Image: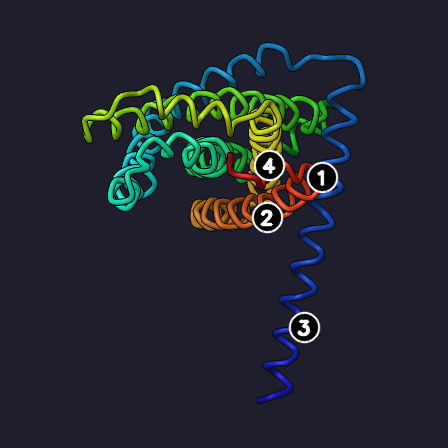
Amino acid sequence: MASQTLSKGAGSVTGFFTEVGTMMILTTRTIVSAVKPPYPYGEELIDQFYFTLKLCWFPLLISTFALCLGAPGLQAAGPLQIFGALDRLGGFFVLTAIRWIGPVVTAVVVGGVAGTAITADLGARKIREELDALQVLGVDPVKNLVVPRFLALMMVTALLDIFAIVFGLTAGIAVELLYHQKLGGFFATLFSNASVTDLWGSVLMCTMFGAIISIVCCYKGMTASGGAAGVGRAVNQAVVIALVGVFAFNYVFTAVLLATNPELQTIR
């Protein structure tokens, strides 16, 4: 019994590293295919960009505004009001809306909405053997299917991150108005703590989130097997793996950003 358990555990670990290695190979192939001519994916890129933007903008708006209005907004405003420091809420929203909630909510929404659609689409094509037919015809599935989705999700997540930051800060303004405070203090502490590094770091991190989500979802879709049930399993696995990858990258990126820019840890 113990040997069987160890064997299953070793098999799971081996399978995990095999999948990670295969995804890294797919990432390399995708980047090379994106920069190497010809570029036949222009129309598909526009379609995927518009498709993702259309699906994600409203859930992102609602989620960002609700989350920023809730925990960092109303709950933080209470203690700050007790100490007469409600004007410090602007600086607090630099940490929440720009560095934390904006990027993370963007990744979750894009992964849950667009990522599942990508996995289901490519998985259905794999089950119907359309991907094999493309290879027989001499059409590279990576260049024609993966690259446009890869580029589209990177661009959309960067754009939606700015969108999320704007509506996150709008929630902070709404909290100030609910507590009948003037907005001068909010914007003063916001701009004294916010920096260009915060903004480009947030957008760059979200761009990499889009890359991670696209690679994981494309890989899971293109390796789906077992009919319709297999496509469903691939979708579930893609969302879980993509979000775990996003959170792991978020930790590493944030640690590196703060280590290389220690001034970001100073509250002014």
At label 1, which amino acid type do we have?
Thr
Q: In this figure, which residue is indicated by the disc labeled 4?
A: 264
At label 4, which amino acid type do we have?
Leu
Closest to the observer: 157 or 168?
A: 168
Alpha-carbon span between mark 4 and mark 3: 42 Å
Q: Give the foreground label among 1 and 2.
A: 1
Alpha-carbon span between mark 1 and mark 2: 14 Å
x and y percent of residue 254 in the render? 61, 42
Closest to the observer: 28 or 172?
A: 172
x and y percent of residue 264 in the render? 59, 36
Alpha-carbon span between mark 3 and mark 2: 27 Å
- Toward the bottom, the furthest residue is 1
Closest to the observer: 97 or 163?
A: 97
First of labels 1, 2 by sequence position: 2
Callout 2–callout 4 Cβ contact below 8 Å: no
- Toward the front, the furthest residue is 84
Alpha-carbon span between mark 2 and mark 4: 16 Å
User: Quarter of the image containing the N terminus?
Assistant: bottom right
x and y percent of residue 162 in the render? 48, 21
> Quick check: 217 left or right of 3?
left
Q: How crowded is mark 4: few (under 14 residues within 10 Å), some or many (20 or more)?
A: some
Alpha-carbon span between mark 4 and mark 1: 9 Å
